[in-house]
Amino acid sequence: MRSAATLVIVAVAVLVQATAVNRVQFDWGPGPDLVVAALVAVALTTTPAVAASAGFAAGLAMDLLPPAEHAVGRYALVLCVAAYLVALLRANTGSPGAVGAPPSAWTGIGVTAVTSLGVGLGYAAVGLVMGDPRVSLGATAVAVGVGTVLTTLVSPLVTVPLLWIRNAFTENEFATIQGPTGLGGW
Amino acid sequence: MFRDSPRSRLVLVVLMVAAVALLVLDSRPGADPVTSVGRAAGEYVFTPAAAGVGWAAAPAVSLYDGLRQAPHAAERIAELEEANAELEARLQAVDNDEERADQLDELLHLSGLGGYEIVPAQAVTRVTARGLAHTVTLDVGTDSGVRPDMTVVNGHGLVGRVVEAGASTSTVVLATDVASAVGARLEDTRKIGVVRGGALPGGPDAELTLELFDMEDPVEAGDRVVTLGSHEGAPFVPGVPIGTVEEVQSAPGALSRLARIAPAVDFASLDLVGVVVAGPAEDPRDSVLPPRSEPEGDR
């Protein structure tokens, strides 16, 4: 059930991003990245290996869908690493095991902001390594900054509901039991 | 902090290697079969999805566009309305100009035939203080060289004479005014008479009446009348068409013969006229008259 939900979430996010968000003309350049926002929700509630796979699949899909003007694999690599790191940090800093409390809404939003920033920079970095002529300091700063802000703004509408959905589908029978102490951080 | 199972790390490494391999494959020059197939598949998925989104989002997109352009739309509408009004006015002006150009052409033709020097003018009003006199106001005056007692013509013939001239306006008494009397001469017989405005006592009801001094003068309907010309061309220069004899009346016991004249000028639609500021060097005789239409008139 959870894996099916993951699949659907990622697929829908990719399709909506590619067909709806990318269609809108923003005066300021980049729009919000729903894929990152959805992937954070997935990565926060799964194991690193699954998160990496989901990130890879989503990134590859974004690479292959027509508006993509870059080499195949570029976004896949960045999203794969990003999702893996989010899941890894979540698994290692949160409560051990699956008994941990579900991540809060604020956690989701914060992680989305940081991940969006990291993905933007990583994407630019891969472009730099590959000799993409479009990567310059000014353009990258503007695109990453605006993209991060917008993605953070839409995360309450994407990441937070997806976290609820994934928690609703959880098979952990102790999920509703609150631990003795509140968990700081993630 | 970064504890992880070896299996999980293996998955990450495999995926990263795959991504880098795809990157390398795709960034090599030339089409690569693997990425080409992938892109084709992506396109296969994307096209119907994008079309569906486009169909579903069309109302929202048009609404968004409408909202985005709403502030400009009002301005744009005002701008277009203004441009439209201006164009309409220009179109009317073109019509008007064509008419005026035609009239000017006629005027030029007449003045060229007669050798007059003409100041073109527009008849501005036909209203007098009492409404009794037949006068018009022209938009030229002494600044343009117009003086009292100058002949006013238009493309068809005699209009009247200037009685008052201001700096930029002048008043013209029409030939149809009751107080107007114009020395006239019949085109064919060279007999002279006076054309008066309105009807004379005992004469036919007419706009213009010709009074011939000689009872024995032959005059028939269809004879044409031109101005006789005054001393030094004031108030009337010679040779300007006045009209055509319509009906001759010989009252028993009258001292003169009266004839009803159809004016050459349509006084009801006076528009562009010319003030003759200098008469011809010599009498143009009948050269100003248009050629007769009837063949038997060429006697």
Image (tube, grey):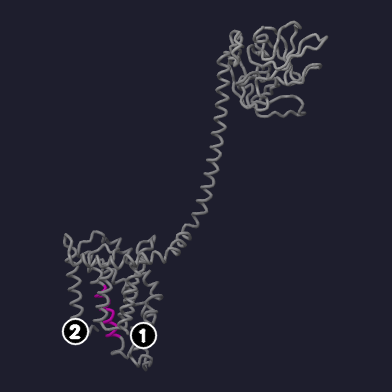
Q: Is residue B114 above or below residue A102?
A: above
Q: Nearer the viewer, residue B218 or B131?
A: B218
Q: How many marks?
A: 2
Locate residue A100: give its quadrant: bottom left
Q: Nearer the viewer, residue B16 or B286?
A: B286
Q: Is residue A37 magenta?
A: no
Q: Which chain does the numbered disc 1 sit on?
A: A
Quarter of the rendering occupied by the N terminus of chain B: bottom left
Locate residue B129: give its quadrant: top right
Q: Secondary structure at mark 2?
A: helix
Q: Is residue A80 magenta?
A: yes
Q: Residue furthest right?
A: B253
Q: Which residues are magenta?
A: A79-93
Q: Which chain does the numbered disc 2 sit on?
A: B
Q: Is residue A145 something that shows in the picture? A: no
The answer to whether residue B110 is left or right of residue A175 is right
Disc assigned to residue B7: 2
Q: Are marks 1 and 2 on the same chain?
A: no
Disc assigned to residue A167: 1
